[in-house]
Amino acid sequence: MVTMELERQVDLTVQLVLLGMLLYGSWLLRSKKNMRGHALIFTAATIINLMTFFLFMVLPFLNEWGEVTASPLVHTFFMLVHHAVGLVALVLSIFVVGRWAAKGFSPQGCKGKSLMYATFGTWFGALGLGSSCSWWNRANR
């Protein structure tokens, strides 16, 4: 049986790889003007994030619900905010990638730079909150 601690470490590692992918995809667009590479990197990142969301976030959260609600109120609050912000980030990324796919994978299908920045900001915020909650769990066991 895989321990929760190992699951959290694998998830954090995957999220850091996703951060690297997002930074690389942004660099492709800004430095190389490679819109297709940028879009493919972000699409892959969205698919990986969707998989990790279910494997490492939803299932463990449901299995640990009693432990989460028994935690101090501040930790429970930050954990629920982390989940809400992460869900918003996931929905936004699916929307951006879905809109691009619906437009035939055309560079013109991704109009909405501010939406992309909002997506990255919410994802990064969820990463920070999740890392903080994970650190708090380790420190208080």
Image (spheres, grey):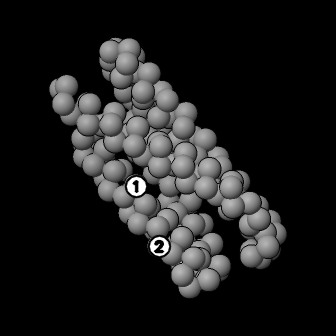
Q: Is residue 66 visible?
A: no
Residue that appears at 44% across and 61% down: 18
**Relative image position of residue 97 (x, y in whole percent):** 68, 62
Which kind of residue does numbered mark 2 sit on? Tyr
Residue that appears at 32% across and 17% down: 71
Identify the mark at residue 127; answer none if there is no mark: none
Residue that appears at 54% across and 81% down: 31
**Relative image position of residue 105 (x, y in whole percent):** 74, 74
Circle 2 residue: 24
The residue carrying pointer 1 sits among few (fewer than 14), some (14 to 19) or many (20 or more) residues within 10 Å by Cα, namely: many
- The quadrant of the rendering that contains the N terminus is top left
Residue that appears at 49% across and 65% down: 22
Upstream in the sequence, badge 1 or badge 2? 1
Q: Is residue 81 above or below residue 47?
A: above
- Closer to the camera in the image, 103 or 112: 112
Label 1 and label 2: CA atoms lie apart by 14 Å
In this rendering, position of residue 119 left or right of residue 66:
right
Which kind of residue does numbered mark 1 sit on? Gln
- Closer to the camera in the image, 57 or 17: 17
- The quadrant of the rendering that contains the C terminus is top left
SS assignment at label 2? helix
Identify the mark at residue 15; answer none if there is no mark: 1
SS assignment at label 1? helix
Q: Is residue 124 above or below residue 75?
A: below
**Relative image position of residue 62 (x, y in whole percent):** 45, 29
